Amino acid sequence: MFANVAERAERQPVLAVSTVIFSLRDDERTGRKSLWLPLVRRTREPFRGQWALPGGPLGPRDSLVDTAANNLRDTTGLVPRYLEQLYAFGDMDRSPTRRVVSIVYWALVREDDDHNTATAANSELLDDPNVAWFRADDPEVLANLAFDHRDIIEYALWRLRNKVEYGSIAHRLLGERFTLAQVREVYEAVLDKALDPANFRRQLRTAANIEETDEFLSGGKHRPPRLYRYTGSTTHPLESENIS
Amino acid sequence: MFANVAERAERQPVLAVSTVIFSLRDDERTGRKSLWLPLVRRTREPFRGQWALPGGPLGPRDSLVDTAANNLRDTTGLVPRYLEQLYAFGDMDRSPTRRVVSIVYWALVREDDDHNTATAANSELLDDPNVAWFRADDPEVLANLAFDHRDIIEYALWRLRNKVEYGSIAHRLLGERFTLAQVREVYEAVLDKALDPANFRRQLRTAANIEETDEFLSGGKHRPPRLYRYTGSTTHPLESENIS
DNA sequence: TTAGTTCTGGTCAAAGTGACTTTAACTAAT
DNA sequence: ATTAGTTAAAGTCACTTTGACCAGAACTAA
């Protein structure tokens, strides 16, 4: 044990970058939509065979956020529009072998995003048994993750629930145009409770980072809802890094 | 230029930890209180002679937050009660010589804190011409900082102003017992605008993370104000790391 | 005793919130 | 063609919160 600590102290720490990605999916259990995230199965020790967050070493010529994006594309086929830095985890005993400092990013994606559908790379990866989506709060899954990835995911969820600006969250999960009912579904998934549609509509009007368009969404077996557009971006540049 | 990039890519990145510390001080210019922070003068290249945030390399046996605290104690004599992780900066060109990934912490301290007064170490450092306090938004100072420390400080200020829980901010800047007027001064310094004392009092009552005591503060030439106590701590553990 | 200062509680109109009702506009079944 | 079913969207009403302002309370200093 002592030898282990001493050994770790002597070697240079490894710099890694990992990513937590949330998406909105139907949840057959509750009937509502809820948050899901992709995990990759580890193919080598330590924690071989267990599920882990997608991640890898810092690219020597890549920025932090580019490292995250590149690794994400290669392992899961996902290309989020922008990533946000979550936290740097650097405790001594995160990895059993040597010291790893992980800078963790997180993002919200919609699965029907242009980048993420119908591409050859993606459809290949969809069949990859080493990549899969899980409910973000499934205790069964969280309990068996590699490293300290359980703590990381729980912190990401906490951050999501404590975000001030919910409008941008909805925008990122839904895309350019969306109905108010869809925005409400996002809020309900994040807050995990039902909301009154009429009051919700009124409150979004005053919140004002959402703007109505002249378009409507037809096709449902009910009155067609108006489509809206996000007009916000009050976040700090460092908190919504674009991918180059 | 190309050679420089290639050279940087070959060598392992350096892991450093820096800290932004804010304190509340009287501002003779505006008459109100405002935010100040300590800087240290660089004694070697690059940026020799210019002011910079206190910081240093990751201690091989120290956690991230301990590295920040140790370096802070050694260079400025300050011992904040807890630090909060701000952001990891890792762009290629942050330092002209080689690639540096800096994990930056931030904290709020009160200058009359037990840890920070009347200790031998501190009084020595007070005379150190290479450590000084500056107004956090002084454009003159910000323009001449080493590395990208200007961006870092501006982001720290942005984060402070966008904090949801202001009660804890006041607590950290003021200590265990404080008057409502002092809390209001904190809000006014952070938000940079005057607030109505009567309405401010009423709102803090409903916010409820502040509790009145039976003590009063006498000595002023006016009615002695009641002292209050903070009863909050709704923040996530990762966002208020204790120093070991 | 009086003037000066801040503390602290109060009023009042305006704005916002939560629970609920009503009407509008579509689809699908009869 | 009519009707039932569904969700959209607007409105009502009691209640709470907010911002601006006023007035008395409690101390110090002259």
Image: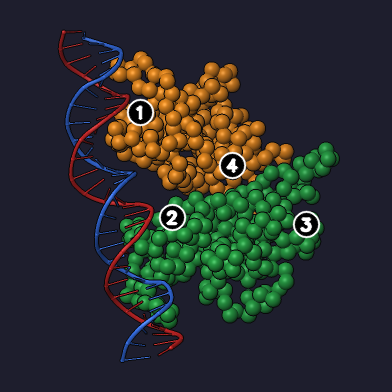
Chain colours: A green, B orange, C red, D blue
Q: Is residue D22 above or below residue C23?
A: above
Q: Which residue corresponds to mark 3? A: A47
| CA–CA distance in space, label 4 to label 1 | 29 Å
Amino acid type, residue under disc 2 in the picture: Glu
Q: Quadrant of the C terminus of chain B?
A: top right
Q: Which residue corresponds to mark 4? A: B237
Q: Which residue corresponds to mark 1? A: B181
Q: Which residue corresponds to mark 2? A: A165
At mark 2, the secondary structure is loop
- Tally of numbered tags: 4
State the residue in front, B139 or D12: D12
- Residue B71, given in percent of the width and then of the height, sits at 61, 34
In the displayed structure image, the side of residue D14 where residue A228 appears, left or right = right
| CA–CA distance in space, label 2 to label 1 | 30 Å
Asked where in the image residue A25 lies, by quadrant, the reply is: bottom right
- Residue A131, given in percent of the width and then of the height, sits at 69, 68
The chain letter for the residue carrying disc 2 is A
| CA–CA distance in space, label 3 to label 1 | 55 Å
Q: Is residue B171 in view?
A: yes
| CA–CA distance in space, label 3 to label 2 | 37 Å
At mark 4, the secondary structure is helix
